[in-house]
Image (tube, helix red, strand yellow):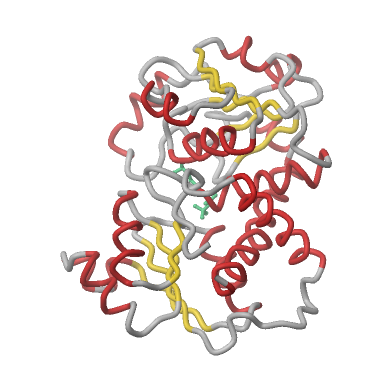
Amino acid sequence: MKNLLSIESLGCAEIARILEVAAVMKAGRGHHAERPLQGQCWALMFSKSSTRTRVSFETGIRELGGGVMFLAADDIQLGRGEPIRDTARVMGRMLHGAVIRTYAQKDVEDFADFSGIATINALTDGEHPCQILSDLFTIIETRGSLDGLSVTFVGDGDCNVARSWIWAAARMGFDLRIAAPPGFQPPDDLLARAGGRISVTGDLRAAAEGASVLYTDVWVSMGKEEEAADRIQRLQNYQINDAICRIAPDALVMHCLPAYRGKEITDETFEAHANTIFRQAENRLHTQKAVLSMLVDA
Ligand code: CP
Ligand code: NVA
């Protein structure tokens, strides 16, 4: 594995290996004998806000022995219009790896091509692969395996997190049900390309019935702020709350965070499942350390 650009670009065996290495990273935290990033310098180049992704990568790179710099896009010439390809060609001559949060999926792909250094997608409009790796790890940690898993994604079914779930379900062979209203459902061509056992419906109650995971994300993703009022109105019935949890009483309730209580999830349901939700956040550190160590080994 030379880069982590998407879940789409990973195979089942690669995902399984990342999750295995993540378990080793988690168990061995604080007493790693090896420092695979020793002598290396990585950059985090972010065009969007972040708490979890930034902190987990900065911590993880340092724990693996590397140095790290944080570059907000507006602090570098990228923010004044220098092309991503030129930025990549400069950084590729100085750094060992880059973690990029931006808008277009093509930008992280171009960065990887033009820099030639290990490149990680830390969220684009197209995918959020690091999040879904952490979520799969959390599910395995809780349930023991992905066997018999059925994940119900509630809300904006065409956002980056939902799209990474689509590819994860296709690659790992579990059931994914997307509950989203028209206008927020993933396009047919994406679903056809992914294959797998994925269903899409506007009927939230039907999608939730008997699910092993109820998952949601914000209704207004970064970059969609101008659509906020319209999105909140059209997605208002796609909320994880006590009534939905009663339909899937054994479900893990998961959220990638940040959460907007009273919108995609109620405060009551969020707090009842906070242990799982914050373990997802913590597991970002361990799964990303697994990815970093595997990219260095490649
Ligand atoms: N879930 C997630 O990626 O959080 P941040 O936006 O805080 O990094
Ligand atoms: N879909 C959300 C995920 C945040 C981690 C966004 O893009 O803002």
In this rendered view, identify the residue nearer to me: 249 or 167: 167
At a point 36% along the width and 85% down the height, the residue shown is 94
- Quarter holding the C terminus is bottom right
Residue 145 place in picture, x, y as percent: 79, 40
At a point 44% along the width and 16% down the height, the residue shown is 181
- The quadrant holding residue 168 is top right
Total marks in image:
0
Residue 111 place in picture, x, y as percent: 32, 64
Residue furthest left as drawn: 81
In this rendered view, identify the residue nearer to me: 186 or 78: 186
- The quadrant holding residue 74 is bottom left
Left or right: where 86 falls relative to 8: left
Left or right: where 25 falls relative to 128: right
In this rendered view, identify the residue nearer to me: 261 or 166: 166
Residue 140 place in picture, x, y as percent: 77, 44
Image position of 23 with respect to 148: above or below: below
At a point 40% along the width and 62% down the height, the residue shown is 100
Residue 284 place in picture, x, y as percent: 63, 57
- The quadrant holding residue 62 is bottom right
Left or right: where 80 falls relative to 141: left
